[in-house]
Image (spheres, rainbow, N blue to C red):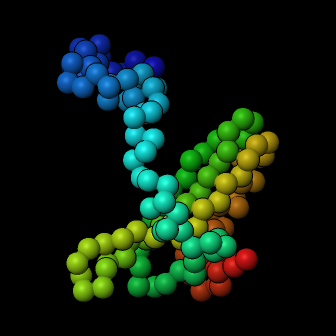
Amino acid sequence: MNPNISQTFLNRERLKDPVAFEREYGAEFAEDIAGFIQRDVLDSSVVRNRFELQPEARFRYFCFVDTSGGSSDSMVLAIAHACKEQGGKGTHFVLDLVKEVRPPFSPDQVTAEFATDIKPELCTRERIREG
């Protein structure tokens, strides 16, 4: 779909890894990784009935957005941070906020709502909603 990518490049990528090529350039879904994380492991990592975490100045936050035109696909916002394990033995990652807006919706309105969620001054407001 991208006219700036040469056929030579595509042929070379296909030869290197045909499966990865189909995922990256052929829009094929990756069925073989459906069990990448076992359901029980994922479930044990989830705090039930917690929807947002209050921001803390000691963490650096990252924002992820999956946009949509508003007619057939959801638009999603996620905010996360990395956290060192006690004793410095490793790092775990915390998903602080996930919001999904299902269609139909106005992309402009949802973008404005998401922008409110990620503004720096929000670090001072309460962001924990439980139950």
Which residue is at 24% across, 25% downward? Answer: 17
Asked whether, in this view, residue 36 is left or right of residue 72, the answer is: left
Q: Residue furthest front?
A: 40
Task: Using the image as rendered, state which of residue 109 and residue 75 is in the foreground.
Answer: 75
Left or right position of 32 against 55: left
Front-most of residues 59 and 46:
46
Image quadrant holding the N terminus, namely: top left
Q: Is residue 94 visible?
A: yes
What residue is drawn where x is 39% and y is 47%?
Answer: 36
Please, is residue 53 above or below residue 19 in the view?
below
Q: Where's residue 39, x and y in %? A: 49, 55
Foreground: 51 or 57?
Answer: 51
Q: Which residue is rendered at x = 38% and y = 30% of the image?
A: 24
Quadrant housing the C terminus: bottom right
Q: In the picture, residue 41 is in which quadrant?
A: bottom left
Q: Is residue 85 above or below residue 19?
A: below
Measured as percent of width and height from the top left, residue 72 is found at 72, 35
The number of numbered badges drawn on the structure is 0
Residue 85, horizontal then vertical, whole percent? 31, 80
Q: Tell me where residue 34 appears, x and y as whole percent.
A: 45, 41
- Quadrant in the picture for residue 100: bottom right
